[in-house]
């Protein structure tokens, strides 16, 4: 189980995938398995949570790395991309954002347990239409003190993601709407799996292969 401390300075990523109906949980489990067996062993990995929407269409991935350099180094390894080719074959990338500007509002820490329900709100501020926002401006919105959520602001100040345990507290909605406009994306999610960093001495899982081969006697196929 992964826990996020509000006081920690973290480099976080939010990825939303648009899947075929009822595939979200399968995709989330597959990505979680790849992370557990491979990605968490890469230097700089700090944790990840994989969510599926109740409608079965959307996958949300929340990932934490030590910093941009750690993520860049991880992306340069074949291990990073081997599962992505399969995910991208079945899903469309709807949103991705990585930023070092991340904190919690109204809560000291957030823990992610399997089956927990979360709400996600994403705001986009068109660059050509308004001045980019800062976390200092957000912190000045008094209503946010009551909103128990994990926040991520893009480095250019034009995008905000809020992830809240349970239902989104709507007390800050008018102030956020005045700053960013209407949410660009809003959905409910359930934690499918959370992955903590590898412990000292933990090794990669053994490689395995899944294939169809003919049985010698009957000519039927079996899994190996």
Image: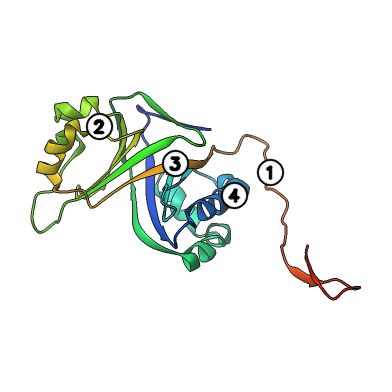
Identify residue for label 4: 33
Q: Quadrant of residue 12?
A: top left
Of the two numbered discs 3 and 1 on the same chain, state the one appearing first in sequence.
3
Mark 4–mark 2 Cα distance, whole angstroms, equals 32 Å
Residue 203 tag number: 1
Mark 1–mark 4 Cα distance, whole angstroms, equals 15 Å
Of the two numbered discs 4 and 2 on the same chain, state the one appearing first in sequence.
4
Judged left or right of residue 151, residue 199 is: right
Residue 112 visible:
yes
| Number of the front mark, 3 or 1 | 3
Residue 63 placement (x, y as % from top left): 44, 45
Of the two numbered discs 2 and 3 on the same chain, state the one appearing first in sequence.
2
| Number of the front mark, 1 or 2 | 2
* Residue under the image location 15 percent in, 26 percent down: 142
Identify residue for label 3: 190
Residue 169 tag number: 2
Residue 65 visible:
no
């Amino acid at each position: 189980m992964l826990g996020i401390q509000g006081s920690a300075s973290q480099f976080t990523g939010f990825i939303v995938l648009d899947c075929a109906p009822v595939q979200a949980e399968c995709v989330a489990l597959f990505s979680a398995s790849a992370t557990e067996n491979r990605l968490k062993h890469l230097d700089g990995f700090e944790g990840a949570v994989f969510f599926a929407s109740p409608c079965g269409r959307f996958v949300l991935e929340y990932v934490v790395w030590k910093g941009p350099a750690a993520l860049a180094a991880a992306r340069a390894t074949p291990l990073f991309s081997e599962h992505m080719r399969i995910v991208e074959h079945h899903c469309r990338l709807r949103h991705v954002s990585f930023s070092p500007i991340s904190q919690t509002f109204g809560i000291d820490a957030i823990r992610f347990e399997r089956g927990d329900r979360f709400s996600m709100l994403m705001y986009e501020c068109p660059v050509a239409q308004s001045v980019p926002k800062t976390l200092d401006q957000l912190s000045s919105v008094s209503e946010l003190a009551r909103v128990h959520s994990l926040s991520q602001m893009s480095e250019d100040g034009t995008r905000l993601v809020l992830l809240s345990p349970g239902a989104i507290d709507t007390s800050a909605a008018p102030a956020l709407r005045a700053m960013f406009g209407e949410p660009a994306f809003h959905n409910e999610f359930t934690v499918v799996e959370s992955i903590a960093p590898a412990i000292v001495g933990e090794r990669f899982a053994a490689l395995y292969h899944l294939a169809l081969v003919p049985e010698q006697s009957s000519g039927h196929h079996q899994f190996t």
